[in-house]
Image: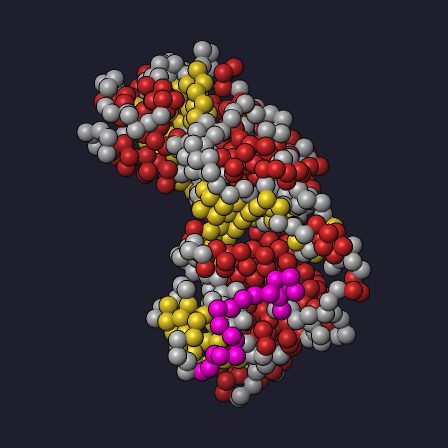
Amino acid sequence: MNLQHLSDVQRRAVTLVDGPVLVLAGAGSGKTSVLTNRVAYLINEKNVSPYHILAITFTNKAANEMKERIAALVDYDVSRMAIATFHSICARFLRHDAELIGYMNNFTIYDTDDSTALIKKVMQNYDHGLGQLTPKYVRHVISMVKNSSGYGEPEEVLKDISEDFSEPLTQIYRAYNEALHRENAMDFDDLLLNMLRVLQENQEAREYYTERFQYVLVDEYQDTNSVQYELVKLFSEKHKNLFVVGDDDQSIYAWRGADVRNILNFEKDFKNAQVIKLEQNYRSHQRILDAANAVIRMADARKEKNPWSAKTDGPKPKVYTAYSEYAEGEFIAKEISGLVRGGKKYEEIAVLYRTHTQSRVLEEKLRMYGIPYRVYGGMSFYARKEIKDIVAYLTLLENPMADTAFLRIINTPKRGIGNVTVNRLTEYAEANRLSLMEAAAGADSFMKGGTAKFSPLLEVLRGIETAAEGKSIGEMIEIVFERSGYHAMLLSDDDITAEAKIENVQELINSARVYEAQAEEPTLEEFLSTVSLITDMDTVEEEGGVTLMTLHSSKGLEFDTVFMAGMEENLFPSKRSVEEGKLDEERRLCYVGMTRAKNLLYLTGSATRTMYSGGSSSNAPSRFLRDIPPEAVENLSVRKDVKQIGHREETTKPRINFFQAKAEFVPKATADPGSFRVGGVVEHGKFGKGTILAIDGQGDQRVARIAFAGGEKKLFLSFAPLTVIE
């Protein structure tokens, strides 16, 4: 088997077949190639039967990629091999052995919704002492308990997670598992936990699996939890040929149970283990690695490594600190526009951030500059349900005739108004040329008890209108959030996602306050128009656009150019991580983000950031930036300006239009905005040639509706890279 395409250290990892082996695979070091070639080497050169090989990954995508690569290297039907995720492997084995622990082998696998519904049913019999705990929160706790079961009994784990509710949660935990057993069902976590039970409780099964799997391989070992660790240990206990690949510097999933100690203690846990370090990075050039290494080297608990690249030439990472998050967003948009004009492609660029709420400002600025983008693993800020719901309430406050907004919030939060009632209301309103709100006020005319049916909603809307009179727009949103019952709904309906949704609404409040501070005569009508325009700007692309994503979502991906936004204290690292002693995890997350870049890396932040309370916080640059030697980066910040602006009084802030670019970031369209006319033909760098159908707005807010071959788009004429053809 030809292994000449591998480096010397990669070949050593592939051919070292006996005993426990830990491969410390740094970012971009070619670990997948090592894993797949090792499996092929075992089959082709060591005559190991594929039946005796177990290869475990964390995602179906990774498992399928491994199978495809191995299939190209061996003469064997890889679909029959045990190459899959932890959950898939355990589910497959349990189909033969579930009866050993009291289940039938035709058990049902309950997904998240199924298990939540069952917990809700169980909780009805254990309602005492639960406070405001919801089924979804309880499911989350139960999942944490099951994933931590390698550390001890559930009761002890529950005390660590929630001491105040440990007793009722323990009762529910037991009742839920009993209900699952009665229904011959397992949730996702049970697949791992019950396979562990099979191995621990049945000696015959244990001997079968430990004898069968002579070679065990595990990818992303740093992401294993306590149950997965125990499974790996048992599967490999007889032959001792355990081969794990991972990087402690990229362990960023502690919040979902991953335990970095599994990889840090590998040599202690498996006697005579050999360690191979894949330190050559084939993705990034050395200057990016120098900066990334400087950050990760400061971690308290890590294995010593020195990632390097044969690509020694390349631009230094660029550091920029703006006055505010809005100026930061404009800097990023301006840089992207310049890079694309210089030949980069949008799809080669990513903007990474610590929290989802940061995407709002970034999206606004990218839209202003006509830059196509997609939000990876999420949705556009203004497309999120909680934002659209709150905006619908505000729309009714401004325009009671807005039937679409009324229909959106008629039963949000739940008010017991069913579809039949809504249909009758709509039919009556249309027949009598009334708005839905007017029709609801006189609902007795077409439905017995109709007025009583709608009165709770109408009272809420009237209460919001009265409370909002004379208030600022930010205060109006706060009133809507509280008086509509939306805030209470989030807290009671879904404790797991409530915090993120609440933060999104608070970010909407921030956007309103910024708008008020910058608009000459701020009004709710203009603010809603602003939001509608942002929402309607058709620059969100599934493919071919800039990628916006959280740092956690970026793991395993790579881009030519990476912007890491929000590099400031209290945001990254987060204040909570510092207070809870989880700084190393944040540091590893920073390292992951930096090593996504192949060629260009930007590290940006802001000297001030709008707070949910309405004021501004002055944040120091992230300590991660301070860890990088000054000579290793190119600092684009104008320090004098940042310092002066950072201490400027609120009253001296310039009064400018919400959409107007800051003076230091004058956008440069490729044509004079005055040269555009309805019927004219223009050309866009991405969308091609198109005809202008309409132009609305004034000054920098002039927006053109343009018919391109791929469909209609709305673009700001002052910012979009448009060229007039005729």
The part of the image, by quadrant, that contains residue 437 is: bottom right
- Which SS does the magenta portion mostly show? loop
- Left or right relative to 558: residue 333: right
At a point 48% along the width and 69% down the height, the residue shown is 670
Task: Identify the residue at the far left of this view.
Answer: 75
| Residue range of the region highlighted in magenta in the rendering | 660-678
The part of the image, by quadrant, that contains residue 252 is: top right
Q: Position of residue 422 (x, y in %)?
A: 52, 74
At a point 19% along the width and 29% down the height, the residue shown is 75
260 up-or-down from 141: above or below: above
In the rendered view of the protein, which quadrant contains the C terminus? bottom left
Q: Is residue 724 magenta?
A: no
Q: Is residue 406 visible?
A: no
- Left or right relative to 611: residue 213: left
The coloring applied to the image is secondary structure
Q: Position of residue 159 (x, y in %)?
A: 65, 31
In the image, 503 versus 247, the foreground residue is 247
In the rendered view of the protein, which quadrant contains the N terminus? top left
At a point 59% along the width and 77% down the height, the residue shown is 699
Task: Identify the residue at the far bottom of this view.
Answer: 432
Q: Is residue 666 magenta?
A: yes
Q: Position of residue 301 (x, y in %)?
A: 60, 25
34 up-or-down from 662: above or below: above
In the image, 203 versus 550, the foreground residue is 550
Q: Position of residue 347 (x, y in %)?
A: 42, 53
